[in-house]
Image (cartoon, rainbow, N blue to C red):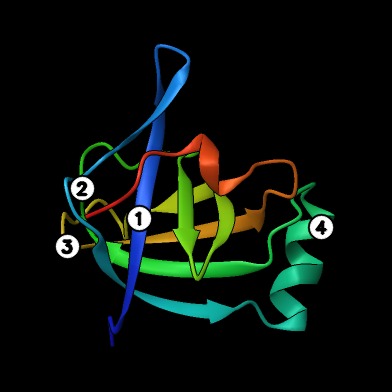
Amino acid sequence: MKDKKIAIYRKQGGAWELICSSKLWAHYRQLSGKEVFAARTAGFTDEVAFTVNWHKDITPGVHIIFRDTIYEATRVDDFEGYKKDLRLTCKHVPYATLSDYPPAG
């Protein structure tokens, strides 16, 4: 169930900009220990996953703000190419601050 609101940003011309003019509905969950271990084996430091409605501009590297925490999407799964949902596997971005991003509506 997509019951959380998130803001998704992409870097454009050296500045972060919102992908959508308002926040998106998303499903949020912590990765299981098995998923974290598998990600680390593959060289990723993923911690959480979001599921959002499909959007053409959501790619690896976008930043997500949820509950005043900034995440970076390391992988984007489009569920076999269907344009319905996207699963974003993300890591925490400790060096970024909320002031780096314009406010979401």
Which residue is labeled 2 in the image?
A: 55
- Between circles 2 and 3, the one closer to the viewer is 2
Q: What amino acid is at disc 4?
A: Arg
Quadrant location, the N terminus: bottom left
Secondary structure beneath dot 4 equals helix
Secondary structure beneath dot 1 equals strand
Q: What amino acid is at disc 3?
A: Lys
Sequence-first disc among 2 and 3: 2
Q: What amino acid is at disc 2?
A: His
Which residue is labeled 4 in the image?
A: 40
Q: Which mark is residue 84?
A: 3
Q: Are marks 2 and 4 in contact (CB under 8 Å)?
A: no
Quadrant location, the C terminus: bottom left
Determine crowd level at label 2: few under 14, some 14-19, many 20+ residues with C-alpha closer than 10 A: some
Sequence-first disc among 4 and 1: 1
Sequence-first disc among 4 and 3: 4
Q: Position of residue 23 (x, y in %)?
A: 25, 60
Judging depth in this view, the residue of 47 and 75 nearest the camera is 47
Sequence-first disc among 3 and 1: 1
In this rendering, position of residue 53 left or right of residue 7: left
- Between circles 2 and 1, the one closer to the viewer is 1
Which residue is labeled 1 in the image?
A: 7
Q: Position of residue 92 (x, y in %)?
A: 68, 56
- Between circles 2 and 4, the one closer to the viewer is 2
